[in-house]
Image (spheres, helix red, strand yellow):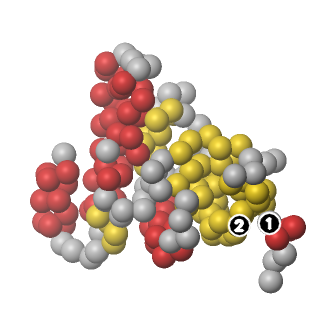
Amino acid sequence: MESIENKLFLTEKINQGTRSAIYRVPNTNHVAKVRYDEDQTTLYNEFNIARDLYNFGIKVAKPIRLTKVLVLEDGKKVEKSAFIQEELVGDNLENMYLFDLLDSNSLRHADNLRKKEVKKAVKIGFIPGDSYARGNAIYNKKKKISYLVDFEDWSKKYFTNKKARILNKKIF
């Protein structure tokens, strides 16, 4: 059993959502998704979806591991579950739209790349939750790559290509 002193202590919060926060892991090129609650099943499922997507060649951050970490809450160190993954270089695609961070042609191109990744995922049996939204994509301007992020609402089903085409039409 790992002692509390040996756990990663995360202090640099770089993003937050309604159910989790993203912290930079010190001295690495990794980030940790830390849930506010202790819903380990959702975190475990998200890790497995990300790992499977990555292994199938879908553009996502490389998943590293599930672990326990320490974060500060009300001035106290609190143990939380976390999903460690590589840190992506880029900007949130939705923010790029909202704040005009790219010209319209580049934005359309970035969004089409995102849609292409979602369609590839659906074709091999994944069902996106809210991750088909632009807010769940990171666009790297230099490499011209859109990465999918945030898979806590995704699931995996096995179905025919015809059903995948129908689902893709509903999403887009």
- Percent coordinates x, y for residue 39 in the rendering: 50, 71
Whether residue 28 sits left or right of residue 140 in the image: it is right
Whether residue 66 sits left or right of residue 44 in the image: it is right
Residue sitting at the far bottom: 1
Q: In the image, which disc is placed on residue 79?
A: 2
Quadrant for the N terminus, please: bottom right
* Circles 1 and 2 in contact, beta carbons < 8 Å: yes
Along the viewing direction, whichever of 1 and 66 lies nearer the viewer:
1
Q: Which residue shows up at 47% across the image and 66% down it?
A: 46
Q: Which residue shows up at 76% across the image and 59% down it?
A: 77
> Mark 1 belongs to which amino acid?
Lys
Confirm whether residue 51 shows in the render: no
Along the viewing direction, whichever of 99 and 78 lies nearer the viewer:
78
Position of residue 35 relative to residue 143, above or below, is below
Q: Which residue shows up at 60% across the image and 58% down it?
A: 34
Residue 124 appears in which quarter of the rendering? bottom left
Whether residue 93 sits left or right of residue 23 in the image: it is left
Q: Point out the frontmost of discs 1 and 2.
A: 2
Residue sitting at the far front: 74
Confirm whether residue 4 shows in the render: yes
Along the viewing direction, whichever of 98 and 159 lies nearer the viewer:
98
Residue sitting at the far right: 5
The local crowd at label 1, few if under 14, some if 14 to 19, many if 20 or more residues have their Cα within 10 Å, is few
- Percent coordinates x, y for residue 35 in the rendering: 55, 61
- Percent coordinates x, y for residue 169 in the rendering: 14, 51
**Helix, strand or loop status at disc 2:** strand
Q: In the image, which disc is placed on residue 7?
A: 1
Position of residue 122 relative to residue 61, above or below, is below
> Mark 2 belongs to which amino acid?
Glu
**Helix, strand or loop status at disc 1:** loop
Whether residue 33 sits left or right of residue 49 in the image: it is right
- Percent coordinates x, y for residue 104 in the rendering: 31, 19
